[in-house]
Image (cartoon, rainbow, N blue to C red):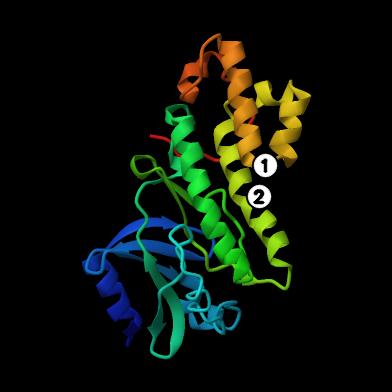
Amino acid sequence: MVFKSVRELNHHIKSNCVFISFGSKGTTYYEKTSNKVIKIFDMALNDSDYEYFEYKDIDFSRFKSAKNSTYLFPIDVIYLKDRVIGYSSELAKGSSLYRTNPLSINLDSLKSAFIKTLLDVKTISNNGILTDDLPYNTIYYPKGKKLYIVDTDDYSFSEMDSSLLYTSNNRQIGNSLKMFLVDGYFDDVVSSNKYLYDLYKNGDFLTFLREYRKILSEIASREVITLKDASGCVDKENRGNYVRLLK
């Protein structure tokens, strides 16, 4: 996609796009005409800032060979004349975790969604891709028991052995899910149990989820299927660091 001027780009955004979110590097829109997401890097639009724009020499199509359904990599590059200013990617169904109330989550469904990602984690790891910055870029689609990872332009290729890459990439997803399920809600439960706390900090997600659910069920005196079943265990004071935007 090539735009001849900033004016043409702004007209396209105003006429065809819906704002999704903005971050430190750019703004994301839903493009109605293509049913895709576009990300525009704000710094790339300003002539004086462009000198410091870190992505001007990056090939956003570099991850295309890692075919998968979890990590939504850039599809097409967006240009302003001959200048790279952004990219498009597939639209993910569902809601970002930081916009989702953890008390509403069915833990069996989330477990299934996580297990579904493991083949894709292996795929990208075998392609030498190292992930980054997942806590606010993970989307959960409960109906399909599916996780999506978006905003993947910061990823890089690594010389790390594929098995070590798999461990690292797997941990990134697991840590994001642990933070989502605990931070600001059940910190007291986790920190008061050394074994659970160690799993939270260093354990794999599935082991942590099993023990977390077991301990919450014991405290709540009922089987915890959704975290709402353990609402009586919620921290009396929110000391969490994970920023949530809940309606």
Of residues 179 and 221, the one nearer the viewer is 221
Name the amino acid type tagged 1: Asp
Expressed as whole percent of the image width and height from the top left, the position of residue 111 reads 51, 38
In the rendered view, does 180 fall on the left or right side of 94? right
- Quadrant housing residue 155: bottom right
Q: Which residue is mark 1?
A: 204
Residue 171's label in the rendered image is: 2
Expressed as whole percent of the image width and height from the top left, the position of residue 125 reads 62, 65
Quarter of the figure with the N terminus: bottom left
Expressed as whole percent of the image width and height from the top left, the position of residue 109 reads 44, 36
Q: How many marks?
A: 2
Q: Is residue 83 visible?
A: yes
Looking at the rendered structure, the secondary structure element under dot 1 is loop
Looking at the rendered structure, the secondary structure element under dot 2 is helix
Disc 1 vs disc 2: Cβ atoms closer than 8 Å? yes
Vertical order, 15 against 84 (above or below): above
Residue projecting furthest to the top: 221
Q: Is residue 183 visible?
A: no
Of residues 54 and 177, the one nearer the viewer is 177
Vertical order, 125 against 119 (above or below): below
- The Cα–Cα distance between marks 1 and 2, rounded to whole angstroms, is 7 Å
Label 1 vs 2, first from the N-terminus? 2
User: In the image, what residue occupies the spot 67% across and 22% down?
Assistant: 188
- Quadrant housing residue 245: top left
Quarter of the figure with the C terminus: top left
Residue 140's label in the rendered image is: none
Name the amino acid type tagged 2: Arg
Expressed as whole percent of the image width and height from the top left, the position of residue 100 reads 43, 37
User: In the image, what residue occupies the spot 52% across and 45% down?
Assistant: 115
